[in-house]
Image (cartoon, helix red, strand yellow):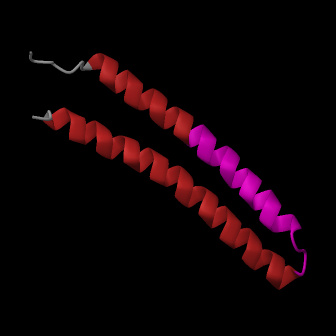
Amino acid sequence: MLDHSFFIKLGRATAVVTEMAVTVILGVYLGSYLDTRLDLSPVLMLSLTLGALVIGMVRLTKGVAKLTAADEEHPSQHRN
């Protein structure tokens, strides 16, 4: 049977990855919207997408480091 801590780790990892995806998607849509409104296509879409990707990667890296540190502090007890 799966350990309860597995589901907690899975939920946290899913949240970190989802946060990155949402950040990039918002960058694309906001850039596209502003390009349409300001007639600058595709300058803002590309700029905001790239910026969102960088921000997402930084937050993903920090999130994974935090999850790894938490996992090392509390190693799971494997029962054989």
Q: Position of residue 2 (x, y in %)?
A: 14, 35
Q: Which residue corresponds to the image point at 82% horizontal and 76% vertical from the top-left?
A: 35
Q: Position of residue 37 (x, y in %)?
A: 81, 84
| Above or below 26: residue 7 | above
77 or 23: which is nearer to us? 77
From which residue to which does the magenta span run?
A: 39-59
Indicate yes or no whether the magenta region holds residue 67.
no
Most common secondary structure along the magenta stretch: helix
Q: Is residue 18 left or right of residue 2?
A: right
Quadrant the N terminus occupies: top left
2 or 39: which is nearer to us? 2
Q: Which residue corresponds to the image point at 81% horizontal and 82% vertical from the top-left?
A: 36
Q: Is residue 25 left or right of residue 11?
A: right
Indicate yes or no whether the magenta region holds residue 53.
yes
Q: Position of residue 4 (x, y in %)?
A: 14, 37
Q: Quadrant of residue 21?
A: bottom right
How many marks the image carries: the answer is 0
Quadrant the C terminus occupies: top left
| Above or below 18: residue 72 | above
